[in-house]
Amino acid sequence: MAAYDPTNIFARILRGEIPCKKVYEDDFALAFHDVNPQAPVHVLVIPKGPYINNMDFSAHAPADVVAGFWRAVGTVARDLGLEDQGYRLVANNGAGGGQVVFHFHVHIVSGKTPPGFGRVHA
C-alpha cells in the first residue's frame, strides 16, 4: 500500500486549509456535504487520522478510534433525519474500487438511488 499523502483534499479540509459545509464534528470524525452530490442527501464522514482506505483504517486504527468513527456515522445519519426513510453507506476501497480521494471516508447517501445501484431482491 502506498504511503498516506498529507496533501490530499480531505487532509487539507481537516487542517482547515480548505472550507467545507460542516454537518458534524467530534474527536474522531468530521462530516460535511459532498461538493458534487449524487443524491438529495450526500454527506461524507472522514476519520481524523491519516488512513488511506478501509483496509488501512480497519488494520491500523486503535479500537476507540474505529468505534468513535462508526458512532459518528450513526449520529450523522440520525441528525440528518434518515433513520426512517433509509440511506446507503458507501466506502470505495482503492482505485479499483472507485476510490478517488485516498483518505478513508464513508458516503451517507439518501433520497435517490445512485446510478449503478439497483434494488436488491431477496
Image (tube, rainbow, N blue to C red):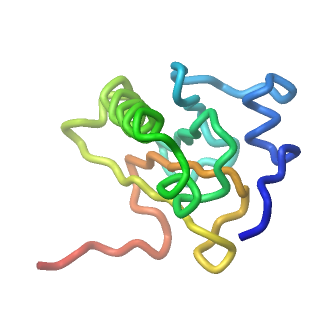
**Nearer to the camera, 113 or 50:** 50
Q: In this view, does 97 lie to the left or right of 90?
A: right
**Residue placed farthest to the left in the image?**
122
Pick the quarter of the image with the N terminus: bottom right
Vertical placement of residue 15 versus 4, above or below = above
Pick the quarter of the image with the C terminus: bottom left
For the point 84% across and 44% down, which residue is it? 6
Vertical placement of residue 27 versus 29, above or below = above
Q: Position of residue 107 (x, y in %)?
A: 50, 49
For the point 46% across and 58% down, which residue is it? 90
For the point 83% across and 52% down, which residue is it? 5
Q: Is residue 71 left or right of residue 45?
A: left
Q: Position of residue 62 (x, y in %)?
A: 48, 40
**Nearer to the camera, 61 or 30:** 61
Q: Where is residue 57 in the image (x, y as percent from the top left)?
A: 54, 52
Q: How many marks do you count on the picture? A: 0
Q: Is residue 8 left or right of residue 57?
A: right
Vertical placement of residue 70 versus 14, above or below = below
Q: Is residue 107 left or right of residue 84?
A: right
**Nearer to the camera, 119 or 89:** 89
For the point 77% across and 38% down, which residue is it? 11
